[in-house]
Amino acid sequence: MTSERPGELVLVRHGETEWSKSGQHTGRTDIPLTENGVEQAKRAGRYLADRSFALALSSPLQRARDTAHLIGVDPELDEDLYEWDYGAYEGLTTPQIKVLRHGPWDLWTDGVPAGDTPGENAAEVRVRVERILNRARPVLAEGQDAVFIAHGHVLRALGAAWIRLAPQDGAVLKLGTASVSVLGYEHGRPVIDAWNIQPRD
C-alpha cells in the first residue's frame, strides 16, 4: 500500500578527514575521520535525533561507517555508495591535476583516467546512484524515511539524479563535510527539501 504522504530520504556526508581538509580527491582510499570530523558527525547526530529510519545504508568505507554510528544508526553497507572512483587522480588536488593535464580539468565533464583503480565518469556514477535510489523508493512510498551516509561527489550525483538533472549537473550541488540534506516529494514530483545543512550547536 502506498502512503498518502511519502517519506523523506536524508543524505549525510561523512565528517572531515585529513584529505578533505587538504582538498585531495579521496575515492577508495580508506582513511578515518579527524577529531573535528568526529565532532561534526556528533552534531549531525544531534540534529537528526528525533528522526527514525526504516532503511539506513552506508558506504563501506571507514569514514562513512564511523559517521553513521556517530549519528546513531546501524546501517547496511552498500557498495553503490562508494565515493567516485578517481582512478589515476586519487589523492591529488584539483590544482595538481590541472598541472598534470597542462590545462583545465573538471571532474563532472572530463572524468578521470584509470590508475590503480579503473576510474569513473559522471554517467558511470549515475548508474550506481540510480540503483541505490531504487532501494529507497519503495520505503518512501510507504511513508517511511531512509538515510544514506556516504561521500561528497557521489551524494551530489545522487541529488542530481533525484531531481532528474543531467549527470554532470551534480557540480552545482555543493556539500560540506557532515552536512545533512533532505530529498522528498511535492505533488508527486521529486524535490530537494533541504541541502547542505551544516548543524551547529
Image (tube, helix red, strand yellow):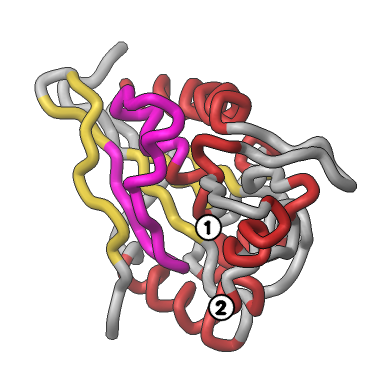
Q: Quadrant of residue 165?
A: top left
Q: Residue at x 57, y 43 (%)?
A: 57
On screen, 42 above or below 63?
below
Q: Is residue 76 above or below residue 195?
A: above
Q: Position of residue 18 (x, y in %)?
A: 65, 79
Badge 2 local density, few (<14 within 10 Å), some, or many (20+)? Answer: few
The residue segment tinted magenta is 157-183
Q: Quick one: label 1, few (<14), some, or many (20+) residues within 10 Å?
A: many
Q: Could you tell me residue 93's position as x and y percent? A: 63, 66
- Which kind of residue does numbered mark 2 sit on? Lys
Up-down relation of residue 51 to residue 168 (above or below): below
Local SS, label 2: helix
Residue drawn at point x = 50 percent, y = 39 percent: 108
Residue at 33% in and 34% down: 144
In this figure, which residue is indicated by the disc labeled 2? 21
Q: Between residues 184 and 173, which one lies in front from this camera angle?
A: 173
Asked whether, in this view, residue 90 is left or right of residue 184, the answer is: right
Residue at the image point whose x is 30% and y is 73% from the top? 199
First along the sequence among labels 2 and 1: 2
Is residue 65 visible in the rendered image? The answer is: no
Displayed quadrant of residue 163: top left
Distance from Cα at disc 2 to Cα at disc 1: 25 Å
Which residue is denoted by mark 1 in the rendering? 73
